[in-house]
């Protein structure tokens, strides 16, 4: 019983510590640690916002680099900003990021023979499952049933 109580108290204290850490991280992030980028025109700014929303943080994996506070996301935003300032267009920036971090970094990966399996395997599995289910539910043919009944009758006659 004491072990359970100790485990519960430990988990509660760790949860509280993590909650405090999140609060401290949020207050630090909102206290001016945000990057302020200067753009020559509104088109560059929109391109920056679009790209940072389309690029995935390699560390967080389910966040784009615009929303992530990971150090690598900060570095990626800075690199996107530098590439835009150098006059690169959207495709050139995406190509640079893909060459550096792989296709995973973009939320819209290209269709390749490897990524095609991501679409085909679930469909093939569903077809296979449907075939297996219909095979199992197939009703036995009457001739087979008649044969079994005849054998059962023979066995009953032998016992008498």
Image: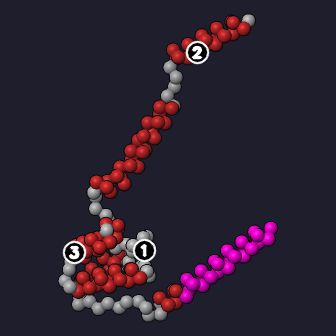
Residue underneath mark 2: 148
Q: What's the distance in space between the residues labelled 3 and 2, CA to CA?
A: 73 Å
Which mark, residue 92? Answer: 3
Give the tally of numbered discs: 3
Residues under numbered marks 3 and 2 in contact, where contact means CB atoms less than 8 Å apart: no
Q: What's the residue at 43%, 36% (across, down)?
A: 131
Magenta range:
1-24
For numbered disc 1, what is the local secondary structure?
loop
Rendered location of residue 104, percent (x, y): 35, 67
**Disc 2 crowd, CA 10 A, few/some/many (<14, 14-19, 20+):** few
Distance of label 2 from label 1 (alpha carbons): 64 Å
Which of the two discs, 1 and 3, labels the residue nearer the N terminus? 1
Residue furthest right as drawn: 1
Q: Secondary structure at mark 3?
A: helix
Q: Give the residue displayed 38% in from the left and 77% down from the top.
A: 65
Membership of 84 in magenta stretch: no
Q: Residue at x 39, y 80 (%)?
A: 72
């Amino acid at each position: 019983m004491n072990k359970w109580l100790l485990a519960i108290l430990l988990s509660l204290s760790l949860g509280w510590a993590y909650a405090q850490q999140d609060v401290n991280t949020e207050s630090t992030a909102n206290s001016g640690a945000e990057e302020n980028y200067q753009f020559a025109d509104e088109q560059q700014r929109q391109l920056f916002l679009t790209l940072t929303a389309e690029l995935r943080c390699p560390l967080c994996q389910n966040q784009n680099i615009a929303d992530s506070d990971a150090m690598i996301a900060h570095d990626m935003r800075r690199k996107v900003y530098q590439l835009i300032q150098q006059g690169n267009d959207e495709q050139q920036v995406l190509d640079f990021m893909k060459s550096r971090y792989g296709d995973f970094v973009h939320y819209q990966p290209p269709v390749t023979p490897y990524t095609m399996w991501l679409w085909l395997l679930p469909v093939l599995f569903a077809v296979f499952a449907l075939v297996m289910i219909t095979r199992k539910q197939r009703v036995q043919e009457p001739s087979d049933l008649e044969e079994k009944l005849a054998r059962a009758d023979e066995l009953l006659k032998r016992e008498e």
